[in-house]
Amino acid sequence: MRITKRTNIAIRLLMYCAVNTGRLVTKAEIARSCNVSENHLAQVTNQLSQLKYLHTQRGRNGGMELGMPADQIRIGQVFRQVEGTVPDAECFADRDGSCPLVSACRLRLALADATHAFYAHLDDITLDVLVCENHELEAILSPVSCAA
């Protein structure tokens, strides 16, 4: 399974906010700590805010924080919402009818089943499971490491 850059950034952003609860975090510190461009981060922030995963506050003392408790954010749901309906295989998007195997292809069904299993497994994982007592992650995403 190939994960898009947008989803990768979304999960990093949510983990950063989860590790740094109790304060508003800025785009600049997240970009620096998570090694992503502020431009890409802004796009993902906007999407996660619209999906209610983030609460954002504009202005001089602005920033962002989780929009809901980390134990209510299911990673599978985040993946589905951020990835959208991007097909996992070319044949899923065979709108032009170029594949002569579509009507008899069992691989297509197998890939659909595998995708369902992938998301179902991620549905069992919440954001807090990724960050709670993950001291190595906390050290990487703490504000102190951003100052270096």
Image (spheres, rainbow, N blue to C red):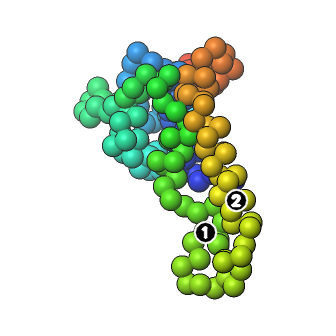
The answer to the question of whether label 2 and label 1 lie on touching residues, with beta carbons closer than 8 A, is: yes
Q: Which quarter shows the C terminus?
A: top right
Residue 69 falls in image quadrant: top left
Does residue 25 sit above or below 133 in this rendering?
below
Q: Amino acid at mark 1?
A: Phe
Is 119 on the left-hand or right-hand side of 68? right
Is 37 on the left-hand or right-hand side of 67? right
Q: Residue, x 39% and y 18% (percent of image)?
A: 23
Q: SS at mark 2?
A: helix
Q: Amino acid at mark 2?
A: Leu
Q: Which residue is mark 2?
A: 111
Q: Residue, x 59% and y 84% (percent of image)?
A: 97
Q: Which residue is mark 1?
A: 92
How far is disc 2 from disc 1 in space, using C-alphas?
9 Å
Q: Position of residue 41 (x, y in %)?
A: 46, 45
Q: Is residue 126 visible?
A: yes
Q: Position of residue 96 (x, y in %)?
A: 55, 84
Does residue 28 sit above or below 8 in this rendering?
above
Q: Position of residue 145 (x, y in %)?
A: 59, 23
Q: Position of residue 64 (x, y in %)?
A: 37, 30
Comparing 120 with 20, the one in front is 120
Comparing 75 with 134, the one in front is 75
Q: Is residue 34 visible?
A: no
For the residue carrying disc 1, how many other residues have a C-alpha within 10 Å: few (<14), some (14-19), or many (20+)? some
